[in-house]
Image (cartoon, coloured by chain):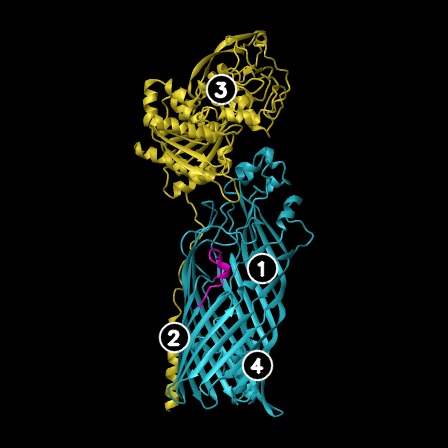
């Protein structure tokens, strides 16, 4: 028992910020090896630690306490072929097929619960740590055509992790018929967002120097930023599990909307267009503090500051049915509806130190403007179907399929929020029971639809005149495997 | 034992499944393209004491206004060879700057960068590209000989002997001595390793420069192809009352006494400069019209405040020019007739037979823009109608602008360069280069 406790504590410490597979929007495609093996159709099954995510009401029907650790190994091959122009004119996006930064991501997670007798009824409680939302993608797609520099690091880097540290509990409302459960606690959100903004040149269109300073290819100024911070917020989900017949279970869950304010450090780079033929003119170079000199100087301006943004994570309604066809065969199906329309993207509010960024006060005012990364997302539906077949008491075979709608409105895709089209997920799973130890394995192949989008979109009414999508062709695949180790006691 | 075997087989299967996903990790992403070949840009002056001679020049003025015209020249990759010798010979493109712009204009818009890229990509042959300051004291020469603004056209193409007042050593009075002015084209062919054949020369330009290009191909036999971008190629437009006529209506405020030719009113500067080029006063032209005189201090950026008169008796004024509009803005047909004599269709009609025939067959590229300046879009459409009516073929492309940048020729030159460089390159290749 002491050894198990040590394993459990180590698993808690190991919890990293890497990702499991994405679902629609920034949802994850399931938690736990058992549920994943069944395609995520688990809300009416909910018979292991992952009930903390799928349906906490299922805990009450588990006959033993459990501690679980699992390791998720994920790899993604997202592909983007840019077709971004302004009025048909290229601005620096690479041509050809571009792949996201290749990584094999590992993600240890864990959970445990204890079956406690409370008064005259059973009560199950425990702790679970799981990741309901995630996004981890990085791209190199662009080099400013009006400045010879390359953007630092990953030009687009979006790593968002929302990890729930939840207290779970469950008890019966109607004996052997209806139970309720909850999973509530603190959600820790970590956000790293690196990205570039192509900002319209701030030169005054009525100024005599405008043509030399802001004509093609200098009509856009590249600003790159990288923010890194975190925040905490309460989160909760509740579930009901109804045993309609001894063979038929029906489950339903609701996850609350969560608003989390994230803050941290911010780095900025600004790439001034390089036009030496103009900049070296004697009637220009003598005004080195002027906006027209700096805007044609080709210099890279840098700044450090801090940022804050509020992230609105969506609520979710879900339901599922499970039917025990025979002692050996279990069928399950789920549907979940995530209100991604509640998610608005990121509105960064920056704080800069008093130092000047450039020699021009006029330009500094423009450089320090807050940036937004708006999204136009829609509510998304996910349907899944799973089968578990008990070959014998020791071996359980699982398979599943899920269909997952994209949350991204047509025409608004951006590589930082990679969710092109509908996804098809094919799952296989295996469970091995060795007395009080259970070894579960699941592997999942996810196929993203190929989509092609054209045209520039301004999602915030073109107030900042910054295009918020990236046109082009998107597609991708993902492969994820989970190995799960459970001790029953 | 059985359980152990199952466990080991399971671990093996899981390992294989994990490995099965480890593919595609070596795919290379595209990166910023780099161009190994870069040309060089040289700056020099074309000094010809007489070429810009005009009654408006002040002998004490800046040499730039007197006789020195700076030019800028792009020498392609391969011009200077590693062994120190000169490569080539190369075909050459003359790019004439628009109104108010100098020889740096095209280079400030990225000409050398685009040329380097296109040559590296094999989209254009290496060529020399030269541009000379086309400005006059009033802002633009229209590449036309004029006693008011100078002999710009002659300076470009005619190696001429002029009589010129000269200080002779030991004498207290000026003597008139012959001065041989070598044409700019001749000078360029003499300095740089060009192919001095018409089929390997091309002319192009934006706005007034496009007019200069068409004037050059119609009044000389030095060029094999021509391009123009948003240029005044048909003075009265397709309707017969557009073009410069509409531009004048746009900028005329109802009084010739307060004509503003400042940098913020380029339209009026163009009208005044065009008048200086196309209808300069000379004593033999005694017509009752509105005219300017006393331009001694006038330059771009000044506001004309001179008292004007419609009295024919004052037409001897040294710097007078005639404008084809009276006090009410109505057209003076006599003066306007002088302008139309410089219109491209007139230049074509009056061209020598060989030039005319060459022009018919010459490859022409016309680039229009959605946000044309100075009503040049009306002139472009009128000129295209003229070409259509006379069965002359041409290529045409339009630039419409974007959400962040309006579609003017200046704004999109960086992209237009690709069109005109490839166009002229293709013609050089077709001619055997």
Secondary structure category for the residue under label 4:
strand
Which residue, as the protein is rendered here, is positioned at the far front? A244
Kindly identify which numbered label has been placed on residue A181: 4
Q: Quadrant of residue B212?
A: top left
Query: Which residue is denoted by mark 3 in the rendering?
Result: B48
Cα separation, mark 1 vs mark 2, equals 38 Å
Residue identifier under label 2: B17
**For the residue labelled by badge 3, is the local secondary structure a helix, a strand or a loop?**
loop
| Chain letter belonging to callout 2 | B
Q: Nearer the viewer, residue B309 or B4?
A: B309
Residue at far bottom of view: A120
Residue contact between numbered discs 2 and 4, judged by CB atoms under 8 Å: no
- Please tell me whether residue B264 belongs to the stretch shown in magenta: no
Q: Chain of mark 4?
A: A
Q: Main secondary structure of the magenta part?
A: loop
The correct choice, above or below, for A105 with respect to B143 in the image is below
- Give residue A346's mark: 1
Q: Are marks 2 and 4 on the same chain?
A: no
Determine the residue positioned at 40% across, 41% down: B118
Mark 4 → mark 3, Cα distance in angstroms: 95 Å
Q: Are marks 3 and 1 in contact (CB under 8 Å)?
A: no
């Amino acid at each position: 028992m002491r050894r198990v406790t040590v394993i459990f504590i180590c698993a808690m410490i190991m919890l990293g910020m890497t990702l499991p597979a994405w679902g629609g929007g920034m949802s994850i495609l399931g938690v736990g090896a058992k549920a994943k093996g069944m395609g995520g159709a688990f809300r009416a099954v909910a018979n292991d630690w992952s009930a903390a995510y799928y349906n906490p009401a299922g805990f009450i029907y588990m006959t033993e306490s459990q501690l679980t650790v699992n390791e998720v190994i994920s790899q993604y091959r997202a592909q983007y072929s840019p077709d971004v122009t302004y009025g048909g004119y290229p601005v620096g996006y690479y041509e050809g097929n571009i792949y996201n930064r290749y990584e094999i991501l590992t993600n240890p997670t864990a959970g445990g619960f204890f079956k406690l007798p409370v008064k005259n009824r059973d009560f199950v409680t425990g702790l679970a740590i799981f990741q309901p939302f995630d996004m981890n993608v990085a791209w190199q797609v662009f080099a400013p055509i009006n400045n010879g520099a390359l953007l630092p690091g990953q030009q687009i880097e979006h790593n968002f992790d929302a990890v729930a540290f939840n207290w779970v509990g469950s008890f019966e409302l109607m004996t052997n018929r209806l139970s309720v459960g909850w999973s509530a606690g603190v959600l820790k959100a970590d956000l790293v967002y690196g990205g570039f903004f192509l900002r319209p040149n701030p030169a005054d269109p009525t100024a005599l120097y405008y043509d030399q300073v802001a004509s093609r290819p200098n009509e856009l100024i590249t600003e790159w930023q990288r923010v890194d911070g975190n925040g905490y917020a309460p989160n909760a989900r509740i579930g009901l599990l109804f045993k309609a017949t001894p063979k038929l279970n029906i489950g339903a869950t609701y996850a609350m909307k969560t608003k989390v304010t994230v803050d941290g450090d911010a780095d900025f780079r600004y790439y001034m267009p390089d036009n030496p033929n103009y900049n070296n003119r004697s009637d220009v170079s003598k005004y080195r503090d002027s906006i027209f000199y700096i805007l044609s100087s080709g210099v890279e301006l840098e700044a450090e500051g801090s940022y804050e943004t509020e992230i609105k994570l969506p609520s979710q309604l879900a339901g599922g049915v499970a039917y025990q066809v025979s002692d050996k065969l279990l069928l399950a199906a789920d549907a979940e509806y995530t209100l991604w329309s509640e998610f608005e993207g990121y509105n960064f509010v920056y704080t800069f130190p008093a130092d000047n960024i450039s020699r021009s006060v006029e330009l500094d005012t423009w450089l320090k403007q807050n940036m937004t990364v708006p999204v136009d997302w829609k509510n998304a539906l996910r349907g899944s179907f799973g089968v578990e077949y008990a070959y014998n008491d020791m071996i359980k075979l699982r398979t599943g399929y899920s269909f997952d709608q994209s949350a991204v409105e047509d025409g608004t895709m951006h590589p930082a929020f990679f969710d092109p089209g509908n996804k098809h997920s094919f799952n296989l799973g295996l469970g091995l029971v060795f007395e009080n130890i259970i070894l579960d394995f699941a592997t999942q192949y996810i196929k993203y639809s190929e989509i092609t989008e054209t045209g520039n979109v301004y999602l915030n009414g073109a107030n900042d005149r910054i295009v918020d999508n990236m046109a082009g062709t998107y597609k991708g695949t993902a492969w994820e495997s989970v190995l799960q180790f459970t001790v029953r006691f | 034992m059985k359980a152990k075997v199952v466990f080991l087989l399971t671990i093996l299967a899981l390992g294989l499944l994990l490995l099965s996903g480890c593919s595609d990790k070596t795919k290379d992403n595209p990166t910023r393209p780099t161009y190994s070949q870069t040309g060089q840009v040289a700056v020099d002056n074309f000094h010809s004491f007489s070429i810009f001679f005009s009654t408006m020049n002040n002998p004490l003025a800046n040499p730039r206004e007197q006789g020195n015209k700076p030019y800028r020249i792009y020498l392609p990759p391969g011009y200077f060879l590693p062994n120190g010798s000169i490569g080539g010979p190369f075909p050459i493109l003359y790019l004439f700057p628009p109104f108010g712009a100098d020889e740096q204009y095209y280079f400030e818009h990225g000409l050398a960068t685009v040329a380097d890229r296109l040559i590296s990509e094999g989209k254009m042959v290496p060529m020399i590209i030269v541009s000379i300051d086309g400005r006059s004291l009033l802002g633009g020469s229209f590449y036309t000989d004029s006693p008011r603004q100078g002999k710009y056209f002659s300076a470009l193409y005619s190696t001429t002997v002029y009589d010129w007042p000269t200080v002779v050593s030991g004498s207290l009075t000026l003597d008139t001595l012959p001065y041989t002015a070598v044409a700019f084209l001749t000078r360029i062919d003499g300095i740089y390793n060009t192919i001095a054949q018409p089929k390997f020369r091309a002319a192009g330009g934006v706005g007034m420069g496009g007019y200069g290009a068409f004037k050059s191909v119609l009044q000389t036999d030095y060029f094999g192809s021509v391009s123009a971008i948003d240029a005044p190629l048909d003075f009265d437009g397709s309707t017969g009352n557009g073009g410069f006529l509409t531009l004048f209506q746009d900028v005329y405020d109802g009084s010739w006494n307060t004509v503003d030719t400042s940098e913020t009113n380029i339209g009026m500067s163009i009208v005044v400069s065009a008048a200086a080029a196309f209808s300069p006063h000379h004593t033999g032209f005694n017509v009752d019209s509105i005219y300017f005189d006393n331009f001694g201090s006038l330059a771009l950026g000044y506001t004309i405040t001179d008292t004007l008169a419609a009295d024919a008796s004052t037409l001897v004024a040294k710097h007078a020019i005639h404008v084809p509009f009276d006090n009410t803005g109505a057209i003076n047909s006599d003066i306007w007739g002088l302008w139309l004599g410089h219109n491209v269709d007139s230049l074509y009609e009056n061209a020598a037979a060989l030039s005319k025939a060459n022009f018919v067959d010459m490859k022409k590229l016309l680039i229009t823009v959605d946000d044309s300046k100075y009503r040049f879009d009306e002139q472009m459409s009128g000129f295209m109608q003229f070409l259509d009516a006379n069965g002359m073929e041409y290529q045409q492309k339009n630039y419409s602008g974007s959400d962040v940048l309006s579609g003017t020729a200046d704004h999109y030159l960086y992209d237009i360069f690709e069109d005109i460089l490839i166009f002229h390159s293709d013609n050089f290749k077709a001619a055997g280069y």
